[in-house]
Amino acid sequence: MQFGIFTVSDVTTDPTNDTTPTEHERIKALVTIAKKAEEVGLDVFALGEHHNEPFVSSSPTTTLGYIAGQTDKLLLSTATTLITTNDPVKIAEDFAMLQHLSDGRVDVMMGRGNTGPVYPWFGKDIRDGIPLAIENYALLHKLWREHTVDWQGKFRTPLQGFTSTPRPLDDVPPFVWHGSIRSPEIAEQAAYYGDGFFANNIFWPKEHYMKLIGYYRQRFEHYGHGTAAQAIVGLGGQAFMRTKSQDAVNEFRPYFDNAPVYGHGPSLEDFTEQTPLTVGSPQQVIDRYASMREFFGDYQRQLFLMDHAGLPLKTVLEQLDILGEVVVPALRKEFAVNRPAAIPDGPTHASLVAARNPAFATPVVQVVDADSALEATK
Amino acid sequence: MSELPLGVPAQQADAKRLIVVTAGLSQPSSTRLLADRLTSATVDRLREGPSTGSGTGVDVDVTVLELRDLANDITNNLLTGFASPKLQEALDAVAEADGLIAVTPIFTTSYSGLFKSFVDVIEPTALTDLPVLIGATGGTERHSLALDYAIRPLFTYLHAVVAPTGVYAASSDWGSPSTSSGTGQGLAERIGRAAGEFAALVRASDRAMNVRDPFALPAGFSPF
């Protein structure tokens, strides 16, 4: 089971003091937050892709490459990479490059994006959203698995004798998640390829996502990748914690009331009851998220949204301390209880290399620090 | 949601499901009054059976939605993209109905904002093939065409089947004779004609019996 955080990279005014970080401050904060995630023992940091204000993350592989250079264990991912408006050739190359630089610490989550004008800005038609996601991913999948590609499709210039470079690390492509909040077509696509399926699970009632994930699990089994219970499922989540739950509620309320997505709408009380957002003590967060497996089945990845709505960096880092030191260790224990042995762990580069060739089941890529390597040669 | 006191046992397997949406804001509301009149006329027609040809009467389950009671939930749905449990129950009831009676006050030349906001949070395909009887209320008869230039196209766009006669009740209608000396123009006569047309559509509808697959893939879809 992998735990981590995902961020949408919004630049939002702090409603409690009316200050707004600059883009530069927010970008640097993202790096600080990612490094903190590793420091407190989280497994994954995932970054969104946006091409409009107030978001700053237009170029996730640049940011993730920089973070890779300053971390050792953290798995770097996206939430999401726009499979509709990006050229799949460029996605293949960017992420293979990041895979090499990070020694395999990368996977990627495909999404269609939710900002209508991004399609025309990138020369696409939003009515082609699903067909673009299907065709572009089919090409990406091929580019990562076949050295020389001849290809022709509807949306892109044909390719003759094209080789995407660099080749994936150890010839094992990054693991792919497909994120969707409402489209059975995308769940079907994830199931067809045996890829992971991620439900952001933050803004809507969990019942909605339970149905979608149930559908993906069934189709995963249908396509012969394993049993429904073995399908690779990721979930989002959202929490704000203080030792005393009323302190958490009081501190978070102005951020909630003014948040870009749900602000000025339902009350914090209604929203926390109706969606997985949990505001309270660490134990309340543990209890809420430990129960998710009862609704979704045993799953592989849990990401939390911790740094949006104008929360100051200092507060976010405090939240990560609580998440990493209290909540996640407890959740790791909870999720391990009665977890069937047949349920796979969250995929990593090492596990994918091992799966490709069981004879080399030991991790091919190990993080070796220079001192211990020198020590070993003596 | 409140049940009209029509003496109909709930949840009859073969009963037609009628949903009544009324967007009046005051209490008591003339919009609700018109909705109730349209409802009881429709229920009577359905129970009597078809006026021509063979066939027997059918039972009816009636559910009334006062949008005023859902106003906060509707606004929250517009902002968050999801319905509260209370609103979801109402939306499901609309989607699974055999017939919809929709009545709104006319504000500033059109349906009320609350009425339109409710329609805006209904899934775009949820009203396909749904028989609809439209009604509206207002201070004067001058706004009666709003039924046909605003409300009817709204439901046509959603692929609902709108009964030819819509009923507009101006304030003066409530103090007029129910028949207009054989012209067929009195409020009760208009309600009767509309209910007759609408009941025929509802009688033929099997929407409530349909199984809906939320994960049905579009025809011709391939995941690769």
Image: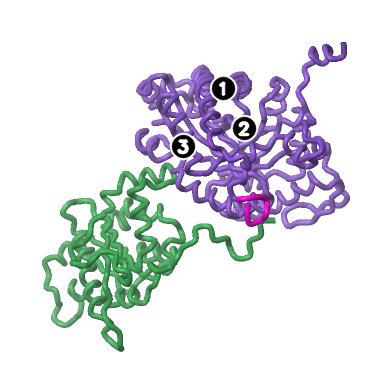
User: In 3D space, how far apart are the residues under numbered discs 3 and 2 (Cα atoms)?
Assistant: 23 Å
Query: At 69% across and 50% down in the image, what residue appears?
Result: A193
Residue A375: image location, x then y, percent: 82, 11
Q: Which residue is mark 3?
A: A291
Please, what is the three-letter code of the amino acid marked with disc 3? Answer: Ser
Label 1 sits on a secondary structure element that is loop
Q: Which residue is mark 2?
A: A46
Comparing A351 with A106, the one in front is: A351
Question: Which of the two discs, 3 and 1, sits closer to the camera?
Answer: 3
Marked residue nearer the N-terminal end (1 or 2): 1
Q: Quadrant of the C terminus of chain A?
A: top right
Examine the residues drawn in magenta and state their main secondary structure. Answer: loop
Mark 1 residue crowding within 10 angstroms, few (<14) / some (14–19) / many (20+): few
Question: Which of the two discs, 1 and 2, sits closer to the camera?
Answer: 2
Say if residue A334 shows up in the picture: yes
Residue A215: image location, x then y, percent: 55, 53
Figure colour scheme: by chain
Label 3 sits on a secondary structure element that is loop
The answer to the question of whether label 3 and label 2 lie on touching residues, with beta carbons closer than 8 A, is: no
Q: Which residue is mark 1?
A: A22
Q: Is residue A226 magenta?
A: yes
